[in-house]
C-alpha cells in the first residue's frame, strides 16, 4: 500500500517533471525561452522577466544546462549593449536617453524588434542579475566569466533603476513601481554578493541597494503595504515577489503586503494581478498563486503554500500545459472579447506559469525533481 505522503510526493514529482519537460521542449537552441510557443503576441520573443524566473526554476530543479544556456543568451545581448549603456550613463538629461533604453524582450535569436511594444521595463534586468546570482551560488560556479554582462546590467540599473518605466504588466502610463524597485534592489544586491565587481561599482551597487530598500519602506509608509506604484493605494500582486522569491522585503511590511494581496486580489487560491486589470477580462494568474506560495514559505506558512499549489496544478491541461490566465471569475468580463478579437485565445502554455509551479514544488520538496 502507498501511503498518502508517498503518493503526494509522487504526484508533485510528476507535475515537476512535466514542467521541466515543457520548458526544455520549447527552449530555443539559442538558449532563449519563448514566453509562449504559440500565442501570437508572445511566440518568437523572450522576455528578460519571464526568462529570468524560468531560468531560476530550472536551476533550482537541477537543470543547470538549461539555465546556463538562457544566461549565455542574455549575456551575449547585454555585452553588445556596452556602448549603449555607457551613453546612457554619460547623458546629461533623461530626455537624451529614451531612444537608448534597453528592451523588455528580444527575438529568440537575440535580435531586437523594432515594434511599438512598451519596452522600457527595468525589472527584468534586476531579475536577471538575481537569477544569475542564485544559479552561481547553487552550483558553486565562478562569476568571473559573466563579469562583462554583469557590469553592463549594474551600470544600467544604477543609471535608470528609479526612472519611471512600465510595470511588470507593461501597463501605461509609466511610473515608479515598488515591484520594479524590488527587482532592481535584488539584482544589485546579488551582483555585489558575487564578489567580482570592482571597488567603485561594488560600493555604488551596495549604496543604491540600501537606498532602494529605504525607498520601498518610505513608499509604503502611508499604505502599510507595498503599493502598485509610488503614491497610489492600489495593490499589485507583482509585489509578492519582493517577499519571495526575491527576499528583499520581509518582517511586518512583507507580511502586510501579503495580507493585502490576499484580501484584495485573491479568491480562494486564485490570484489576480491588480484590481483594474482588463487584459483578457482580468482573470486569475496561476504563476502568481505559485509566487504567493513561495512568499508564504518565507513566513513558514507551508499549509497556505500547499493550498495555492493545489489550485495551480488543477490549471494544467491534459498536455501538462499551464495557462497565463486560468478559468475563474473575471474582474472586467466586458474586456474579454476585445482581447480575443485582437490576439485570439489567451496564452497557453505560458512557460513562466510552469516555471513558478516548478519553483514552488522544489521549495516545498527540495531534491524532488
Ligand atoms: C505580461 C508580462 C509578460 C509577458 C510575456 C504580458 O502579458 O503582462 O508580464 O512578461 O506577457 O509573458
Image: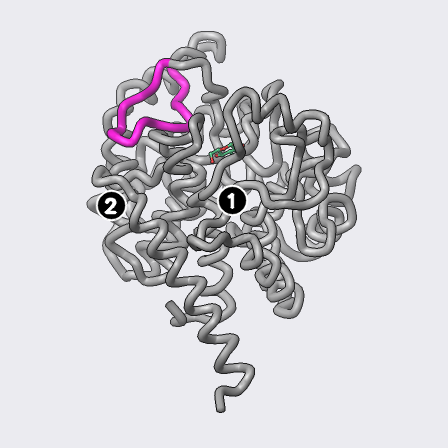
Q: Is residue 53 above or below residue 347?
A: below
Q: What is the secondary structure assignment of the residue under circle 1?
A: loop
Of all residues, the one furthest to the top in this rendering is 96
Q: Where residue 110 sits in the image (x, y, percent)?
A: 27, 29
Magenta-drawn stretch, dominant element (helix, strand or loop)? loop
Disc 1 packing (10 Å; few <14; some 14–19; many ≥20):
many
Seen in the image, is 39 located left or right of residue 179? left
Q: Where residue 327 sits in the image (x, y, percent)?
A: 63, 45
Disc 2 packing (10 Å; few <14; some 14–19; many ≥20):
some
Q: Where residue 346 sits in the image (x, y, percent)?
A: 53, 34
Nearer the observer, 79 or 17: 17
Residue 188 quadrant: top left
Magenta residue check for 346: no
Nearer the observer, 143 or 204: 143
Nearer the observer, 246 or 24: 24
Alpha-carbon distance for marks 2 and 1?
Answer: 24 Å
Q: Which residues are magenta?
A: 100-114
Residue sitting at x 78%, y 39%? 223
Mark number displayed over residue 323: 1
Mark number displayed over residue 86: none
Residue sitting at x 61%, y 63%? 305
Residue sitting at x 71%, y 37%? 330
Residue sitting at x 45%, y 50%? 321
Residue at label 2? 69
Q: Where residue 147 sits in the image (x, y, percent)?
A: 25, 41
Q: Is residue 227 above or below residue 107?
A: below
Magenta residue check for 112: yes
- The reply to whether the residue tagged 2 has its Cβ within 8 angstroms of ligand 1 is no
**Dot 2 or dot 1, earlier in sequence:** 2
Q: Is residue 64 visible?
A: yes
Amino acid at each position: 500500500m502507498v501511503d498518502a505522503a508517498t503518493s503526494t510526493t509522487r504526484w508533485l514529482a510528476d507535475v515537476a517533471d512535466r514542467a521541466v519537460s515543457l520548458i526544455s521542449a520549447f527552449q530555443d537552441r539559442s538558449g532563449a525561452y519563448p514566453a509562449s510557443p504559440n500565442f501570437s503576441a508572445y511566440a518568437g520573443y523572450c522576455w528578460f522577466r519571464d526568462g529570468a524566473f524560468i531560468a531560476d526554476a530550472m536551476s533550482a530543479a537541477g537543470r543547470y544546462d538549461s539555465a546556463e544556456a538562457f544566461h549565455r543568451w542574455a549575456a551575449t545581448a547585454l555585452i553588445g549593449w556596452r556602448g549603449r549603456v555607457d551613453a546612457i550613463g554619460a547623458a546629461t538629461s533623461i530626455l537624451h536617453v529614451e531612444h537608448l533604453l534597453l528592451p523588455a524582450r528580444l527575438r529568440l535569436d537575440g535580435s531586437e524588434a523594432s515594434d511599438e511594444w512598451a519596452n522600457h521595463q527595468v525589472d527584468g534586468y534586476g531579475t536577471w542579475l538575481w537569477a544569475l546570482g542564485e544559479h552561481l551560488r547553487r552550483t558553486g560556479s565562478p562569476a568571473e566569466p559573466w563579469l562583462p554582462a554583469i557590469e553592463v546590467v549594474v551600470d544600467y540599473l544604477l543609471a535608470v533603476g528609479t526612472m519611471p518605466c512600465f510595470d511588470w504588466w507593461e501597463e501605461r502610463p509609466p511610473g515608479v513601481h515598488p515591484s520594479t524597485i524590488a527587482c532592481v534592489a535584488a539584482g544589485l544586491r546579488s551582483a555585489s554578493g558575487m564578489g567580482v565587481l570592482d571597488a567603485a561599482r561594488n560600493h555604488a551597487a551596495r549604496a543604491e541597494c540600501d537606498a532602494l530598500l529605504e525607498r520601498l519602506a518610505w513608499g509604503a509608509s502611508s499604505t502599510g503595504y507595498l503599493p502598485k506604484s509610488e503614491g497610489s493605494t492600489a495593490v499589485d500582486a507583482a509585489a509578492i515577489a519582493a517577499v519571495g522569491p526575491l527576499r528583499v522585503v520581509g518582517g511586518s511590511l512583507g507580511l502586510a503586503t501579503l495580507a493585502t494581496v490576499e484580501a484584495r486580489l485573491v479568491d480562494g487560491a486564485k490570484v489576480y494581478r491588480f484590481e483594474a486589470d482588463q487584459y483578457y477580462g482580468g482573470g486569475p494568474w496561476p504563476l502568481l498563486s505559485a509566487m504567493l506560495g513561495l512568499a508564504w514559505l518565507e513566513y513558514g506558512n507551508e499549509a497556505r503554500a500547499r493550498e495555492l499549489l493545489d489550485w495551480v496544478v488543477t490549471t494544467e491541461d491534459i498536455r501538462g500545459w499551464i495557462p497565463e490566465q486560468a478559468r475563474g471569475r473575471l474582474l472586467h468580463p466586458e474586456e474579454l472579447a476585445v482581447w480575443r478579437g485582437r490576439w485570439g485565445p489567451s496564452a497557453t502554455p505560458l512557460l513562466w506559469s510552469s516555471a513558478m509551479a516548478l519553483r514552488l514544488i522544489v521549495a516545498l520538496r527540495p531534491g524532488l525533481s
